[in-house]
Image (cartoon, grey):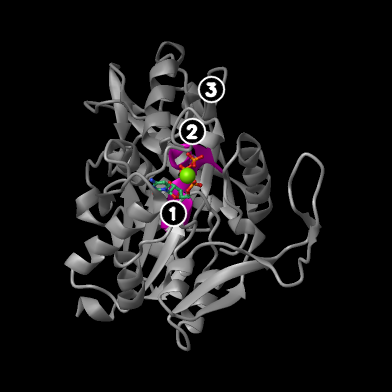
Amino acid sequence: MNGHRTVALIVAAGRGERSGSALPKQFASVAGRPMVAHSHAAFVAHPAIDAVVVVTGGDQFASLEAALGPVTAVAGGETRRESVLAGLEAFAADGGAARVLIHDAARPFLSTAVIDRLLSALDTAPGAVPVLPVADTLATAGETLGAVVPRDALVRVQTPQAFAFVDILAAHRSWTGAEPTDDAQMLRAAGGAVLPVMGDTMLEKVTYPADFATAEARAGGRFRVRSATGYDVHRLEAGEELWLGGIHIPHDRGLSGHSDADVGLHALTDALLGTIGAGDIGTHFPPSDAQWKGAASDRFLVHAAELIRARGGIVDFVDLTLICEAPKVGPHRAAIRTRIAELLAIGEDQVSIKATTTERLGFTGRGEGIAAQAIATVRIPEAS
Ligand code: CTP
Ligand code: MG
């Protein structure tokens, strides 16, 4: 069964020595998430890809899990070639595959279109790679420049590179040449044809320090900023616990409602859902559903953030205003901020907590209830 599948292999076992990054570059942040998370999400989301394996350094498993959550990972080797081979052997031990795409974690912005082009080229050849034309003049390097190298006959070769699984595995296993810079050259050396398909400037590799800024700029063009608001009110009643902004606050009364009635988290959840037009909290967690009775609202907020991330989105900023006469929010502001940042997996500098009274006017002024309003700003990839 496994021998029929199409699988993806991401190599992320390098040290990123040329990148100047404190972390190995595959774990450094690009467009709001660890670099490796971008291409991993692209493969996971592609309907033709049945399994994804990430190859990482023997001492990098914890960093990988922090970046991606639980994933199938294997330890890489000293060179990129050894890392790829380790990944191929892992698939081979797991029943093999029909087709494999081999990709550098250092090329974060992988589109569905590139994957589609590669897979359709594999219908007619055992190998396919994305290529781009060379636009600059090429010359032999030296103290003074040498001869011009005709560029019309040259292309730049990117990853992912797609192969018939048995062919690339055999080419890797039998390789005895110098250290190769990609996998397609090993297939060609073994006599396999490699088809070029149109590459993508979004796939440029992050190698040197300046490449991070270029990658951010490239990513910026892919995203649209969206903001949305949320609003909620719950009644204050005796005999209830008070949960506000994800923390428990000792008070003589608490908020009543079907869940824990955390008005702050509910307003924030609605704001986040609004950014992707995903309805509101009641759409996802209907009050009529008994399983949400007394539920901690933490999970509502986490769910909304996960929906945004599942679309390749980034939560940039949230701002919450709590409206009540009592309790005083000030002494709890820092704890609320910390808790919300933790739930959304963003920095505290991306969370703002404010509070106001209504000068004893209205239901909040009379202490009958607490209101909350929130705004969330996210970035969503253009295509979704
Ligand atoms: N790679 C790998 N195993 C290695 C070396 C590299 O899996 N032993 C991966 C890198 O993580 C990267 C890809 O191969 O995703 C391309 O390699 P490169 O850009 O050279 O990355 P690094 O080796 O990490 O960087 P440097 O050469 O600057 O140290
Ligand atoms: Mg390297």
Q: Is residue 6 visible?
A: no
Chain part drawn in magenta: 25-41
CA distance separating discs 1 and 3: 58 Å
Residue at label 2?
372
Mark 1 touches mark 2? (CB < 8 Å): no
Above or below, 185 relative to 341? below
Q: Residue at x 22, y 76 (%)?
A: 2
SS type, badge 3: strand
Using a 10 Å C-alpha cutoff, classify the residue at mark 3 as few (fewer than 14 neighbours), some (14 to 19) or many (20 or more). Answer: some
Above or below, 370 relative to 214? above
CA distance separating discs 1 and 2: 60 Å
Q: Is residue 274 magenta?
A: no
Query: Foreground: 31 or 304?
Result: 31
The picture places residue 150, in percent across and down from the top left corner, at: 78, 66
Residue type, mark 1 in image: Glu
Q: Which mark is residue 179?
A: 1
Q: Which mark is residue 70?
A: none
Earlier sequence position, callout 1 versus callout 3 = 1
Q: Residue at x 35, y 34 (%)?
A: 262
Q: Is residue 60 visible?
A: yes
Residue at label 3?
354
